[in-house]
Image (cartoon, rainbow, N blue to C red):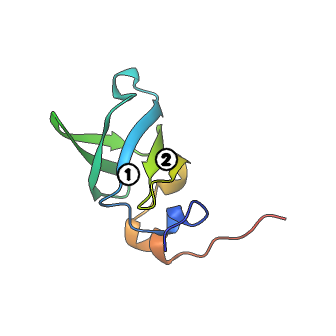
Amino acid sequence: MITPQNVIRHELIGLSVRVADSSNPRQIGIEGTIVDETRNMLVIMTREGQKRIQKRYATFDLRLPDDTRVRVDGSILVMQPEKRTGMRIRKLR
């Protein structure tokens, strides 16, 4: 089950997303569904077509299947998706 605590370890394709912040002001506010993911990019299907957003320079608002919204700094997503989904998360004390 995908939760706000483990969202970075899960598959992102299929989730609704909004670009909350970006180094490129024209990308802020882009909304749609994640249709592909590479090491450095998220591909978002919007009403205007596909948009490619660099992870490192953006912050994303993800909507989880239970309708919970989570803000994620894209820089922590920068890695191959298959490696990210298999990694373990250390808890900070």
Distance of label 2 from label 1 (alpha carbons): 9 Å
Q: Which of disc 1 and disc 2 is earlier in sequence? A: 1
Q: Quadrant of residue 81?
A: bottom left
* Picture quarter with the C terminus: bottom right
Which residue carries the number 2 mark?
74
Q: Amino acid at mark 2?
A: Gly
Horizontal side, residue 3 vs residue 12: left or right: right
Residue drawn at x 46%, y 43% as measured from the top left? 60
Residue 12, image x, y percentages: 38, 61
Q: Quadrant of residue 3?
A: bottom right
Q: Which residue sits furthest top?
A: 25
Q: Which residue sits furthest front?
A: 66
Residue 38 vs residue 71, the one in the foreground: 71
Seen in the picture, residue 30 relative to 36 is either above or below; the reply is above
Residue 85 vs residue 1, the one in the foreground: 1
Seen in the picture, residue 56 relative to 2 is either above or below; the reply is above
Residue drawn at x 37%, y 58% as measured from the top left? 39
* Residue 3 numbered tag: none
Element type where label 2 sits in the image: helix
From the image, state whether disc 2 or disc 1 is nearer to you. Answer: 2
Element type where label 1 sits in the image: loop
Q: Is residue 48 visible?
A: yes
Residue drawn at x 32%, y 58% as measured from the top left? 38
Residue drawn at x 38%, y 29% as measured from the top left? 29
Residue 77, image x, y percentages: 48, 55
Which residue carries the number 1 mark?
40
